[in-house]
Image (cartoon, rainbow, N blue to C red):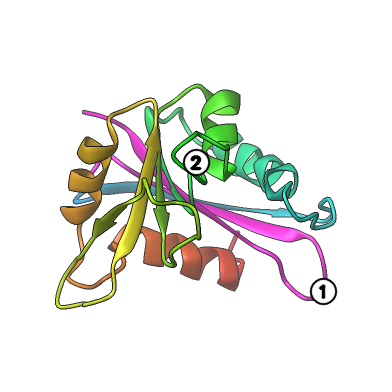
Amino acid sequence: MTRTGAVDVYYPEAGGATAALVVAGDPGFADPLAEHVVRLEEVAPYQPGAFFERELPALEAVLAVADPVELLVIDGYVTLDPQGRPGLGAHAHERFGVPIIGVAKTSFRGATHAIEVLRGDSARALYVTAAGMDAQVAADLVRNMAGRHRMPDALKRVDHLSRRGVY
């Protein structure tokens, strides 16, 4: 069993952040085990090129309330270009010491290394990058994650939880 987590962070207009985590007993999220949501009253301001400084404390907070995961799936890029310019996922990999799969909904100029993954009946690709594991293995895991639509169910669920702010 590989304890796998999917995480997302939402920033409400009122300030602060809400981070959500869905944990499953497998990388396909066929068997969700737990859901966690935490609220941070204060977060660093957004700074272009340093998004990770705002996001990592929220991810750290929600991961702290759960049993450890061995693989983490994020909404976004791990690396931003083929030369390895770090995105949120690379910083998360360094901070948490587990393999990270980045699943981005939009193409990032320069991220020509991202593997395009089509799911369900969607003609719009997801863009997969990874740290701590082979990117093609990560893309195959995303392709086979639970859910019939473009976005895997686990990523839709953490987005919903973080926006709803249920604790």
- Amino acid type of the residue tagged 1 in the rendering: Ala
Residue assigned mark 1: 14
Q: Which of 113 and 118 is in front in this view?
A: 113
In the drawing, does residue 61 fall left or right of residue 114? right
Residue depth check, mark 2 versus mark 1: number of the one nearer the observer: 2
Q: In which quarter of the image is the N terminus?
A: top left
Inspect the magenta stretch and tell me whether residue 19 lies in it: yes
Residue 129 % position (x, y): 38, 44
Q: Which residue lies furthest to the top in this view?
A: 97
Q: In which quarter of the image is the C terminus?
A: bottom right
Disc 2 from disc 1: Cα separation: 30 Å
In the drawing, does residue 57 fall left or right of residue 83? right
In the drawing, does residue 11 fall left or right of residue 30? right
Q: Nearer the viewer, residue 8 or 129?
A: 129
Q: Is mark 2 on a helix, strand or loop?
A: loop
Residue 124 % position (x, y): 28, 74
The residue under the point 27% across, 30% down is 134
Q: Is residue 139 above or below residue 126?
A: above
Q: Can residue 26 be seen in this view?
A: no
Mark 2 or mark 1, earlier in chain = 1
Q: Is residue 86 above or below residue 158?
A: above
Q: In which quarter of the image is residue 17?
A: bottom right
Task: Determine crowd level at label 1: few under 14, some 14-19, many 20+ residues with C-alpha closer than 10 A.
Answer: few
Q: Start and end of the magenta stretch?
A: 1-27
In the drawing, does residue 75 fall left or right of residue 19? left
Q: In which quarter of the image is residue 59?
A: top right
The residue under the point 28% across, 67% down is 125
Q: Residue 98 carries which label?
A: none
Residue assigned mark 2: 79
Q: What element carries label 1?
A: loop
- Amino acid type of the residue tagged 2 in the rendering: Thr
